[in-house]
Image (spheres, helix red, strand yellow):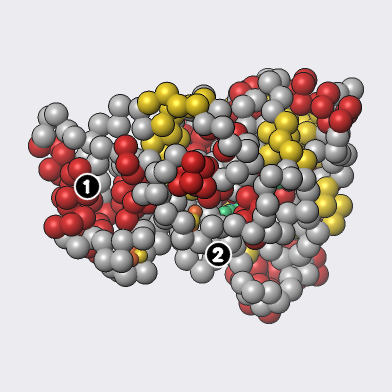
Amino acid sequence: MQFTLNGREVDVAAHPMRRLLDVLREDCELTGTKEGCGEGECGACTVLIDGQAVVSCLVPFAQVDGRDVRTIEGADAQALQRAFMDHVGAQCGICTPGMIMAAMSLGPDPTRKQMQEALAGNLCRCTGYEAIYRAIGEAKRANRRTPLGVESIG
Amino acid sequence: MRSVVSTLELRRPRSIREALTMLRDDGPFVPLAGATDLYVALNFGTLTATRFLDLWPLEPLRRVEMRGDVLSLGALVTYTSLTRSRLVTQRLPMLVDAARLVGGVQIQNRGTIGGNIANGSPAGDTLPVFAAADAVVVARSASTERRIPFVELYSGYRTTVLRPDELIVAVEVPALHGGQWFRKVGTRAAQAISKIVIAAIDGDAPRVALGSVGPVVVRARRAEQALAAGQGIDAAVAALQTEISPIDDVRSTAEYRRVVAGNLLREFWTRATGRPRPDA
Ligand SMILES: Cc1cc2nc3c(=O)[nH]c(=O)nc-3n(C[C@H](O)[C@H](O)[C@H](O)COP(=O)(O)OP(=O)(O)OC[C@H]3O[C@@H](n4cnc5c(N)ncnc54)[C@H](O)[C@@H]3O)c2cc1C
Ligand code: FES
Ligand code: FES
């Protein structure tokens, strides 16, 4: 199966019905994408396909044929990652890669409501979400002040 | 994951015609769209089917267009594309309201209307919308195309009149007059399967449909007639109670659903009668 993975053309041989999540973790050795629930509920396994957030535990591998897949390893999300550290937006950390991938779709200076909607499919058992919203708010503001934002996903 | 995938087969047709030919000549296959229902079952290990047909690359099934006065929605149209569509926002705003409340963003980006309809869960959020709108399901096989009125699609709990060699290719929605209204009652705003869901259209001939109050979506004809005949909302709520058959399950109880169904009808009618009629 040929597709673009974190900006590089790749050709990965794997069974077409395997979950994208498993192919990424086991065949592509990209273990940043986590499995939480395995039923689409928690968002820990969120990656971007053609720029759209999806849960990779519910994507048959065949369906990334010719598409553009972006995982946390290639997200180029330093501003978000730093803000998550600064605001303790990550505690145990299992939800964090998915949170950051889901947050990538937000524009600059998102409102609280926009953040809640973008992250509605991402569960966190540790932080109570407040620190996550603060982190994203700051990263997206900082990003706006930096014309050459580090978050462009190409 | 609790399923072994190495024994599963996936066919990848390049056109709708090729898909239909595969279904006719080599079937049966289970159609695979956004996989947000099927892969939950795969993860649980409850999927018994072993042969699948991938519809996802079939771009013509993503069209949203007007055919004369009819709004045609391709089977692969996702919740996200519904909320972004100007046509759907203008013609069928209650479907946009329904789409915004499905799952979270990740599910909205992948879940399709064809999947929601074919899956046939009585809690499927788009089902009452299509039932109230008098929508028509376009089912195609290699040799025929049928137009099935949405209210005749389900033959029982999660079963449809679709034949194994047929695909849903589109849903057609006629022009609607009157205000549209959608409400979903669940445990929280996001990622919650409905305890009860209602779609309704006001006007001289009000139309009301409810989900999660029976084995299949219910078009509440008796309640509609009571409202149209001016018998008042109490009579309409009483009529509604005779046409729903909710059960106790993990999400709610039969009693709760009966009370809330009545309350939702009242809320709809209060809004409908408090607003100037479109023809007034
Ligand atoms: C976390 C989560 C939250 C969810 N929240 C909601 C919710 O709030 N409301 C709601 O209604 N649903 C919800 N769902 C269920 C699901 O997302 C929807 O039912 C969705 O619309 C299914 O579409 P799909 O394309 O993913 O279907 P798939 O899983 O690909 O297919 C579902 C069924 O439809 C059949 N099928 C698909 N396309 C066709 C076609 N064109 N012709 C014939 N048969 C076809 C398949 O064979 C299968 O039986 C949720 C699911 C998850 C995992
Ligand atoms: S592991 Fe995919 S959504 Fe939870
Ligand atoms: S930090 Fe532990 S689940 Fe979010």
How many labels sit on residues? 2
Q: Residues within 10 Å of mark 1 (few under 14, many from 20)?
A: many
Disc marking residue B131: none
Residue at left 36%, top 32%?
A: A6
Q: Chain of mark 2?
A: B
Q: Is residue B276 among the parts visible in the rendering?
A: no
- Amino acid type shown at disc 2: Val
Looking at the rendered structure, the kind of residue marked 1 is Leu
Q: Is residue B182 left or right of residue A30?
A: right
Q: Quadrant of the N terminus of chain B?
A: bottom right
Q: Nearer the viewer, residue B50 or A47?
A: B50
Residue at the spot 82% in from the left edge and 27% down from the top edge: B22
**Whether residue B263 is visible:** yes
Name the residue carrying label 2. Answer: B185
Horizontal and vertical percent for residue B92? 58, 38
Of helix, strand and loop, which one carries label 1? helix
B144 vs A142: above or below:
above
Name which residue lies at 62% across and 27% down: B57
Q: Which residue is mark 1?
A: A80
Residue drawn 42% across the image and 43% down it: A29
Q: Quadrant of residue B32?
A: top right
Residue A94: image x %, image y %? 36, 60
Vertical placement of residue B264 versus B208, above or below: below
Furthest residue toward left: A145
Marks 2 and 1, how far apart at CA: 34 Å
Q: Position of residue B190 (x, y in %)?
A: 47, 58
What is the chain letter for disc 1?
A: A
